[in-house]
Each structure stands twice: as structure tokens, then as C-alpha cells.
Amino acid sequence: MAVIHHTHVKPTKLELLTSWLPGRPWYGGDAGGPELEKAGGFRLDDPAGEVGIEFMVVNDTSGPEPVTYSVPLTYRGAPLEGAEHALVGTMEHGVLGQRWAYDGCHDPVLVAQLAALLEGRAQAQAQSVSDTPDLDVAVSYTGEGPLPVALTAADDAEGSVLAAPGVALRLHRMLRPAPDGSVASPAAGVLGQVSGVWRAPDGARVRGVFAELHRTPTPEA
């Protein structure tokens, strides 16, 4: 289980995201930059104990309508080779020293553990408490066999897609709460989904979908 260190981080995660978010194709805030506040999230454990994995939720109140973002992040003690394009920034951790923060969609450790979460081989963990499952994270999966972990990541205006032959895992970057406070069962063609809760800009506790696994056509040989 990951150990949560309650210490200072400089720059803070919100400061890193304030600089990084405006360059994303799915950014929907003010052109002058976001005004962020932490709104929730959850963690996953790296079985090797080397990489921190966090699904961070932030509210952006910079525009006329608030926007809520889901930002999967990984934290490493050394640069991830070949992932320069996915670097969110570096920060100094009060206990662990220098850390490299990455867009987790491009980090193979996060991708593998997200697949394990969907398959039921991993459990979401509380964001700020060590060794504590996050029971607000709900997972459904109707696929057969293990998911591929060699997924190719790409961003578009709707979010991020992790794709492999036959499947596409869409990560919603702009989160939307379920209208009635509960998430419906996955629609036809959806093999699995991950939902969770966060704090809306008005302070309400809401639930919505973080990720959906879709079946896609397999090219004919």
C-alpha cells in the first residue's frame, strides 16, 4: 500500500496544473488561465511501490461556468524515459525529494493499474489516507479475459483515449455529475466503467463517470 506523506510540496500540485492545463485540447476554462481548487479524487497502488498514482479532481472557476477536471497523475523519483511530452512538471517533496509529475495516461504503470482496477484485481485507495480503500469508487466490467496494457494514448477535445485493437478506454477529463446523483449501468457496447464522487463548485457532493471501456471494431485481416 502507498504511504501518504503529509508534508510540503513546492510548487504545489495546483500550481503545476495551473500552468499545464491551458495547453490541453480538452481545456475549457478562461484563456487567461484556470483558477483551481481541489475537489477530490482517488489513488491506485503501484505493486512495485515506486510510482505514485493519483486521479486528481479540480474545479476551475475562471470562466463564466465552472468546469471540473479529472487529471490522472503519476509521481516518479526519476524521469520516465520517452515521456518528455507528458511531463506536467517537477516539484520538491518534503520527504521524498525531487519528484517528476506526469500525465498518467502516458505512464505505463498507471495504465496497467487502471486495467487492473477495471478487472477487479486492484482497489481504489483514499486520496489522502494511507492503507484505506476508497469505497466511493464504483467499478463495473463485463469483458472477458485480461485487458491489454499496451494502450496508445491520445488526447482530443473530449478527453483522453487509451486504445488497443478491439477496445478503447476513454478517460473523461471534464467531469459531469449524474443528473439524479447515481450512475446508470453501462450502455450497450460499454464493457466497463469507473465512477466516483467529488465536490462540485457549489459544495455539493456529486457522482459521475471517470472512465469508460468501449468495444471497437477489429480491422479485418
Image (cartoon, rainbow, N blue to C red):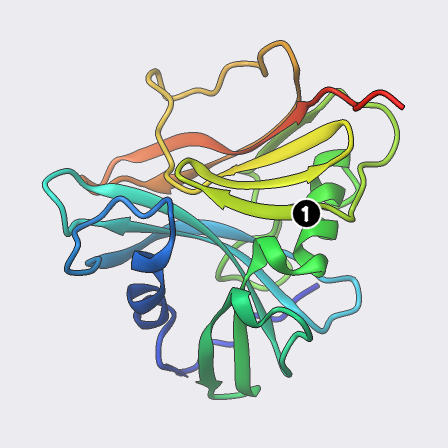
Q: Residue at x 36, y 65 (%)?
A: 20
Give whichever of 5, 38 is nearer the camera: 38
Q: Residue furthest left?
A: 64
Disc 1 secondary structure class: strand
Query: Amino acid type of disc 1?
Result: Thr
Residue 130, placed above or below residue 139: below
| Residue 125 point in image, percent of width and height | 60, 52
Q: Residue furthest top?
A: 188
| Residue 148 point in image, percent of width and height | 81, 41
Residue 7, placed above or below residue 3: below
Looking at the image, residue 58 sits to the left or right of residue 90; the answer is: left
Residue 182, placed above or below residue 208: above
Residue density around tag 1, few if under 14, some if 14–19, many if 20 or more, within 10 Å: some
- The residue at which mark 1 appears reads as 152
Give whichever of 156, 206 is nearer the camera: 156
Quadrant location of the N terminus?
bottom right
On the image, which quarter does residue 7 sit in? bottom left
Quadrant location of the C terminus?
top right
The total of numbered circles placed on residues is 1
On the image, which quarter does residue 49 sit in? bottom right
Looking at the image, residue 47 sits to the left or right of residue 140; the answer is: right
Q: Residue at x 80, y 37 (%)?
A: 147
| Residue 89 point in image, percent of width and height | 45, 75
Say whether residue 212 is visible. Answer: yes
Q: Residue at x 65, y 60 (%)?
A: 107
Say whether residue 45 is visible. Answer: no
